Every structure is written in C-alpha cells, then in structure tokens.
Image (cartoon, helix red, strand yellow):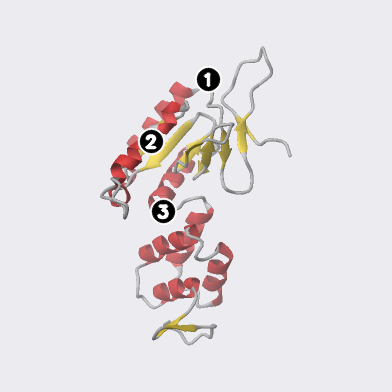
Amino acid sequence: MRSTRPEAARWVGNVHSVSVERALADCERFGLWSPEDVRTCVIAALQQHLASPARIRAELDAGRLNKTAGGRQGLADFEAGAWSIPEAVLIRLLRCRWRSLTIIPNAVLTTPHGTYIGRPDVYLPTFGIAIQVHSRAHHSGFDPAGRDLWASTLDHDSRYPQHGITLIPVAPTLLRDVPGRFLDRVAGTMRRRRGLPLPDMVINPGRGQSWRRVDPPQGSPRSNETRRPSA
C-alpha cells in the first residue's frame, strides 16, 4: 500500500494488504508499474473474478484521477468482452472495420444437446466464423500435469471445423504489425461464407443470454443470421 487515503486493510503474515483494486490503482498512481502492465493486470483480475468492474471503477474514481489511464483502459477492454490485451486489439480492429458486424467475444459454443465445442476469443455469428489469438507465451511449453500446451491448442482448434465453424487463427504480432492484411483475410472468409448454412449450435456469450440460429420457414432461403430466442 502506497497511499494515506484510508481503506480497510489487513495483515497477511508481515505484509500490510489492501484490496486488489486498491493495489492495482496505487501501482499506477505511484509509478510502480507501467500503465500497460496495470491494464494487463486489471483485465486478468476481472477475468479471474478477483475484482468486479464496479469495484475497479469505484477505486479509480475515489482517488486522484491522473495516472489512472492504464486501469481505465483495462476496465474498458474487459467490459468490451476482452480477456487480454491482444483480444482487445482484435475486437477494436473488427469494430473499426465493420461497425455493424455482430461480434461476440469469449462465447461458449455448444451443440444443441449441450456438447462443448469451444470458447473462441471472438465469434462472428452472422458468418459462422471463430477467431483465436494464439500467443507464444500462453500456448508453448507444458502445464503442471505435463501436457503439451501447443498440442492441446491444436486439439481444441480441431473441434471447430468438425461442427461446421470456420476458424481463423492469428498471432498477436500479426495484429500489431499487419492488421490490414489480417482484416482482408477475415473479409475474404466472410465473402466465402455468405449464404452458406450456419452451424446448428447454441451460443452463450456469458452475459445472461443464450443465442441460437433461427432457421427461416420452409421454402424460404436460409440466411446467415443469429437472433435472440424469445423469452
């Protein structure tokens, strides 16, 4: 803790501790971490349920407002659906290129019978396209159980085409260095998918609602459209 502003604190061993949101905010306010590091950690804390958006926002607003850009950006990224900075970059690029495109970040995709398909970083329900950001840091090496992380990633990716979903993988460095080329490839994939039948599955975007493809009446042309089911 690096502030005289009062907050309920507790001792953990010999360390005087405060809430996660207070610690993250103070790390940026007092220059202990860079804004980009705070942005990353705010997203991670929210994704892991160590803090809530309301608590992060309240903490950022309660103290001095300067030197809070990283924390505020991390909060905005998470509320836009991103669970990492590369995902935030991906979502921003897609929304800047196609403002009316339906984008569902981190949706849980299942079959109509409940079989788990995957949770792509972004799903485009109008076209049946999933996009995965594969970073070297998170998909290389072995987990504590000794499983090959890259092999596991490829195994998970292979589920999408099995269920009629077109998968587009991308590395964070490509989003950073050649975003136009990546978006052109997404556009080309959209053109090839337009008018094709959509996968029959349930889409749960994790915001309290389920999504599922609704077929038009018999005799009507099938369109690439995803709608909210009626309550």
- Nearer to us of marks 3 and 2 is 2
Q: Is residue 94 above or below residue 71?
A: above
The residue that label 2 is drawn on is 157
Kind of residue sitting beneath label 1: Gly
Judged from the image, the secondary structure of the residue bearing numbered disc 1 is loop
For residue 113, side relative to residue 230 (left or right): left
Q: Position of residue 36 (x, y in %)?
A: 37, 62
Kind of residue sitting beneath label 3: Ser
The residue that label 3 is drawn on is 84
Q: Is residue 177 visible?
A: no
Kind of residue sitting beneath label 2: Asp
Q: Position of residue 156 (x, y in %)?
A: 39, 38
For residue 45, side relative to residue 174 (left or right): right
Mark 3 and mark 2: Cα distance apart in space = 19 Å
Please, which residue is most extreme toward the top here?
219
Q: Which mark is residue 195?
A: 1
